[in-house]
């Protein structure tokens, strides 16, 4: 076998996944766009169909997006101005526990002093007086008040409390395209892929386009959306459906303008539980993105639409509900049985899709592209090894996402509809999750639970959801001397956290105020 | 709180302004904005650093008088002990503002002088007269107005100066660790200074550009002003019990 070097990469698909992957890989390998492109050892081409509209999955990111943008050499000020972006500090879950007016927060900031002390056991005795997330993190107070995570004098990408973004996915893809083409040396081809030419070993040798001929490459990255043109249609790698665990398979999405231009912008994703699904509510500077994701086997489109419009009517205005246009999306919850096959790897919706309950879509794109960039095989011979590792890693990650999303449902006390009852049916709960729940009944999650470097959610996230939903961990009664010492330390930490929260509430502007200031002044780089 | 009103020679005819400097007149400030045009004088007395306006996040050069809020090490019972007092300190209680000037064109603006009527310097019995008996501007007011105009030009100049510094990435954050004679450690946070390493690596063209605009001299004066930190630490030590 000849030692075929990997020097040419082709990305098929120009949505958020395609351009984000292009940016991440190009930033790693074409560090300086001023160097003559012919001197590069790599060539990255993105083929974008001029005919297919992008879906624009994911209007919420994780905090990881900050370093992803920074590595690409993007200015945070420009990003916020051009992508209609705002700050996200976590999620507020409404009605998940009882279906009434219960609400809890899952902030991005881990509990105070988390590295040394697990405050969860100490909070148990105060659970009736203060919510867990308020007791351990200053961020919850900021989320409920819609405050920003930083000030205008805070340098770009730095923060007072950890944050990610809400953004306009369509604008984000365009913004990334301009940056990739102008600054990172990515070649942009506008054409439809109409065929695949195979090599003798079963690899893809080239893709045939309608207007730009055949385009050869050593590695093809399939970002063509749920169709998965290369991995799905060409190679026939199928979806492993997860609808037996996570029932939601339909989304009704709408974009709703604010009533007044200076209406508050929420600094959290709002997630409001419904009869057979939940409604997302994401505040951008210029509009809100509101949608209903539900299980089509538990709810009709008509009833789901009614629930969505009722939400818009009560949280925005009856007029907004009357004029809302709704777009319907069907999806099979699940992921491909493998993501990298031969010389083809799928990213984004081509790899899989699951309800956006914890905004896992974009972070998976970031992680996938980062691994490809980091471990880009030097030649064809080692590619199969990298592919195997990639598949193992991402299958594990998908499982962890599924476990974590399912956790939100199994803790619910709601029994008002078949949907909520079915969600708690033991046969729908993965064994890996049941096992963890068993352990957590007697000890709260902490560092010992992160056994794997590829765990998607930190143990702190499990704490926030478990105790936000009212889960009870039966403590060993506190009695020994060291326990009493630890309790004293914990009381001090609770107090500190309260003081930090109070100080931050005093100095931080509202999300809207900060966005306005960014438009006027911009952030400093230092 | 301040209460600025537009200055005029009818309402304010008998007004006097106390020009002494001291805590009673709000001179106990830790630092104050300064401008390249006065750097030569400022650097002979005070360290020049940069800080950010909390309302806009924009940088500006500032003269340092103390190491903590409301502390001015140059103040003593006799007043402000230094050979040069920065313009932003001497401007009080006046402020320059701008009004539309339709006589001179659509976007034209004319400077107007405002005065802070709640400022403790305002008096009817002591200090400098603002207007003469005949209602003309007094020599003191003329000087004050010239200073206000200089400050106005200084703001514009600062904007360009900061732009040039940021473009060349010449600012870096700066933390001063001070150990006093009593062994206590103090940290000065939230200030920025010139990144000398980056300055030394600047290409000839970039340096020439800074030079033509007069910014290179300003940069070196800022670097020279650092020798004023030591005397301030000595003052601080002298105050220790």
Image: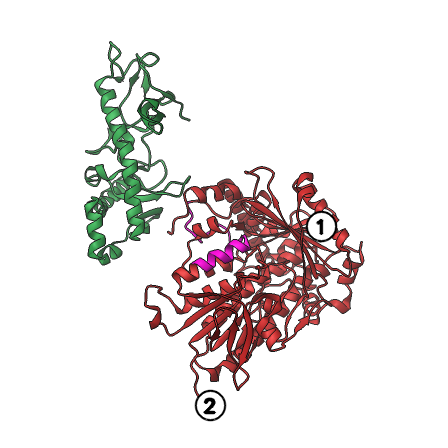
Tell me if I can see residue B240 in this picture.
no
Tell me if I can see residue A523 in this picture.
yes
Q: Which chain is green?
A: B
Which disc number belongs to residue A95? 1
Left or right for A462, reference B227 = right
* Residue at x 66% of width, y 62% of height: A405
Circle 2 chain: A
* Residue at x 69% of width, y 64% of height: A442
Which disc number belongs to residue B20? none
Colour treatment of the image: by chain
- Say what secondary structure mark 2 lies in: loop
Q: Colour of chain A?
A: red
Left or right for A518, reference A301 = left
The residues colored magenta run: A153-178
Q: Position of residue A210 (x, y in %)?
A: 52, 69
Q: Sort mark 1 into few (<14), some (14-19) or many (20+) by Cα contacts within 10 Å.
A: many
Circle 1 chain: A
């Amino acid at each position: 076998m000849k030692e075929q070097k990997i020097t040419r990469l082709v990305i098929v698909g120009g949505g958020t996944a395609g351009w984000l992957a292009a940016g991440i890989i190009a930033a790693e390998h074409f560090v300086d766009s001023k160097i003559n492109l012919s001197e590069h050892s790599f060539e990255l081409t993105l083929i974008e169909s001029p005919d297919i509209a992008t879906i624009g999955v994911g209007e919420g990111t994780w905090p990881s997006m900050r370093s992803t943008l920074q590595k690409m050499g993007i200015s945070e000020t420009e990003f916020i101005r051009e992508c209609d972006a705002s700050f996200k500090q976590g999620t507020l879950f409404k009605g998940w526990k009882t279906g009434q007016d219960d609400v809890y927060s899952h902030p991005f900031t881990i509990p105070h002093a988390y590295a040394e002390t697990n405050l969860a056991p100490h909070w148990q005795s105060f659970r009736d007086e203060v919510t867990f997330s308020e007791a351990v993190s200053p961020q919850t107070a900021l989320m409920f008040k819609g405050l920003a995570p930083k000030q205008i004098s805070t340098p770009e990408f730095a923060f007072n409390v950890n944050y990610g973004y809400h953004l306009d996915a369509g604008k984000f893809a365009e913004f990334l395209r301009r940056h990739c083409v102008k600054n990172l040396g990515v070649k942009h081809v506008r054409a439809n892929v109409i065929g695949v030419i195979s090599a003798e070993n079963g690899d893809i040798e080239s893709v045939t386009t309608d207007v730009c001929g055949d385009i050869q490459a050593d590695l093809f990255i399939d970002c063509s959306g749920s169709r998965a043109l290369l991995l799905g249609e060409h190679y026939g790698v199928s979806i492993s459906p997860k609808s037996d665990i996570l029932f939601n398979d339909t989304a009704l999405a709408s974009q709703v303008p604010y009533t007044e231009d200076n209406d508050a912008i929420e600094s959290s994703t709002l997630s409001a539980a419904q009869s057979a699904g939940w409604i997302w509510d994401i505040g951008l500077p210029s509009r809100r993105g509101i949608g209903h994701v539900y299980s089509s086997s538990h709810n009709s489109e008509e009833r789901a639409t009614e629930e969505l419009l009722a939400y818009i009517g009560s949280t925005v205005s009856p007029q907004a509900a009357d004029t809302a246009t709704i777009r319907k999306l069907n999806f099979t919850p699940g992921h491909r049985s493998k993501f990298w096959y031969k010389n083809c790897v799928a990213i984004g919706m081509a790899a899989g899709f699951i309800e956006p309950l914890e905004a896992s879509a974009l972070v998976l794109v970031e992680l996938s592209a980062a691994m490809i960039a980091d471990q880009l095989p030097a030649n064809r011979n080692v590619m199969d090894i990298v592919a195997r590792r990639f598949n193992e890693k991402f299958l594990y990650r998908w499982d962890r996402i599924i476990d974590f999303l399912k956790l939100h449902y199994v803790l619910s006390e709601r029994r008002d509809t078949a949907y909520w009852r079915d969600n708690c049916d033991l046969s729908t709960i993965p064994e890996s999750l049941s096992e963890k729940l068993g352990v957590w009944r007697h000890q709260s999650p902490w560092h010992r639970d992160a056994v794997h470097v590829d765990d998607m959610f930190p143990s702190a996230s499990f704490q926030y959801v478990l105790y936000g939903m009212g889960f009870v961990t039966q403590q060993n009664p506190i009695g020994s001397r060291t326990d009493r010492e630890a309790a004293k330390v914990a009381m001090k930490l609770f107090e500190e956290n309260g003081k930090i929260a109070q100080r931050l509430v005093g100095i931080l502007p509202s999300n809207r105020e900060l966005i306005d200031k960014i438009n006027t002044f911009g952030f400093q780089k230092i | 709180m301040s209460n600025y009103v537009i200055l005029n020679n009818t309402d304010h005819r008998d007004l006097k302004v106390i020009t002494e400097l001291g805590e009673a007149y709000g001179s106990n400030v830790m630092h104050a904005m300064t401008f390249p045009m006065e750097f030569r004088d400022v650097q002979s007395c005070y360290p020049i650093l940069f800080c950010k306006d909390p309302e806009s996040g924009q940088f500006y050069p500032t003269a340092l008088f103390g190491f903590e809020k409301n502390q001015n090490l140059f103040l003593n019972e006799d007043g402000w002990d230094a050979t040069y007092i920065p313009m932003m300190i001497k401007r009080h209680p006046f402020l320059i503002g701008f009004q539309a000037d339709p006589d001179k064109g659509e976007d034209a603006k004319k400077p107007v002088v405002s005065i802070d009527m709640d400022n403790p310097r305002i008096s009817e019995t002591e200090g400098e007269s603002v207007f003469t008996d005949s209602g003309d501007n007094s020599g003191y007011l003329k000087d004050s107005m010239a200073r206000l105009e200089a400050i106005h030009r200084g703001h514009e100049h600062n904007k360009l100066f900061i732009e040039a510094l940021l473009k060349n990435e010449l600012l870096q954050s700066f933390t001063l660790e001070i150990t006093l004679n009593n062994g206590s450690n103090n940290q000065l946070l939230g200030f920025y200074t010139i990144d000398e390493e980056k300055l030394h690596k600047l290409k000839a063209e970039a340096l020439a550009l800074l030079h033509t605009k007069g910014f290179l001299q300003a940069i070196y004066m800022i670097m020279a002003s650092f020798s004023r930190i030591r005397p301030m630490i000595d003052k601080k030590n002298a105050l220790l019990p």
